[in-house]
Amino acid sequence: MSRRDPKDRPNARFHGRVEGTGRTCDEPGCDAPGEFRAPLQDGPRNRGDGPGGYRYLCLDHVRAFNAKYNFFTGMSPDEIHDAQRPYAGWERETRAFAHSGADVPPRWADFSDPLDAIGARFRERKAMERKDGKPLSGEDRRSLKVLGLDHDADRRGLRTRYSELVRKFHPDRNGGDRSMERALQEVIAAYQQLKSSPAFA
């Protein structure tokens, strides 16, 4: 028995080799191990969701099978055309998710909140909502804090507060003292951010 060249030994990860089947090649007269699956040549082509039947071949016979295999054998021209469309198989309708049983979300009343963690977070969020219903982003809230403004401040109140703080921190109003320049820069940045925010549009 001749030894096979190591280069001919297939890589199981990339070449579909099935080890440990205990089968011999299904090609008549061949007693080599059947380590490679190949579709059945005879019989009806599988039309369901799963694969069709297989036969097991040795490396030489699976190479010969692959060389002459034609996926479209036995198909009509219309079936070949349908199989070659780019979206073939994607139009199949999928089952909708059920809206009963385990899919029903739990009610808030089903949660136990002994430390008031959920309730406190909800009340805090509720307290930070504007009366006019306009949304406040996290950046909006930080900028309002820099300016010392309430979350319900309007555009006029924003301008008034900005003018007050600029006068308070500007070096020209403090005898040339530049120690509050950083605070002034933060006020200007917060004002510019809020001025373009939807909440103050």
Image (cartoon, grey):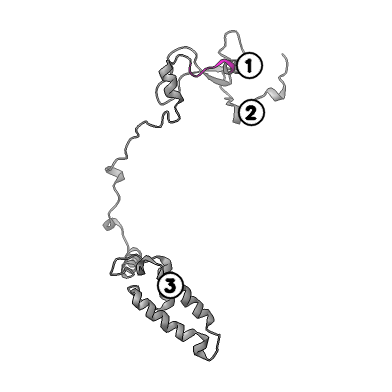
Give the quadrant of the C terminus. Answer: bottom left
Q: Which residue is mark 3?
A: 143
Q: Residue at left 45%, top 72%?
A: 192
Residue 156 drawn at (x, y percent)? 34, 77
User: Which residues are the magenta region?
Assistant: 67-72
36 in relation to 188, above or below: above
Q: Residue at left 47%, top 12%?
A: 42
Q: How much space separates mark 3 and mark 1, taking CA atoms?
A: 74 Å
122 in relation to 86, above or below: below
Q: Name which residue type carries label 2.
A: Asn
Residue 167 drawn at (x, y percent)? 45, 85
The disc at residue 60 is: 1
Which of discs 2 and 3 lies nearer the camera? The answer is: 3
- Residue 133 can be seen, yes or no: yes
Q: Residue furthest bottom?
A: 175
- Which sits in the foreground, 75 or 193? 193
Q: Which residue is mark 2?
A: 11
Q: Residue at left 62%, top 15%?
A: 32
Q: Quadrant of residue 116?
A: bottom left
Q: Main secondary structure of the magenta part?
A: loop
Cβ atoms under marks 3 and 1 closer than 8 Å: no
Q: How much space separates mark 2 and mark 3, taking CA atoms?
A: 61 Å
Q: Determine if the magenta segment contains residue 194.
A: no
User: Mark 1 or mark 2: which comes first in sequence?
Assistant: 2
Q: Quadrant of residue 127?
A: bottom left
The disc at residue 108 is: none
Q: Residue at left 72%, top 21%?
A: 5
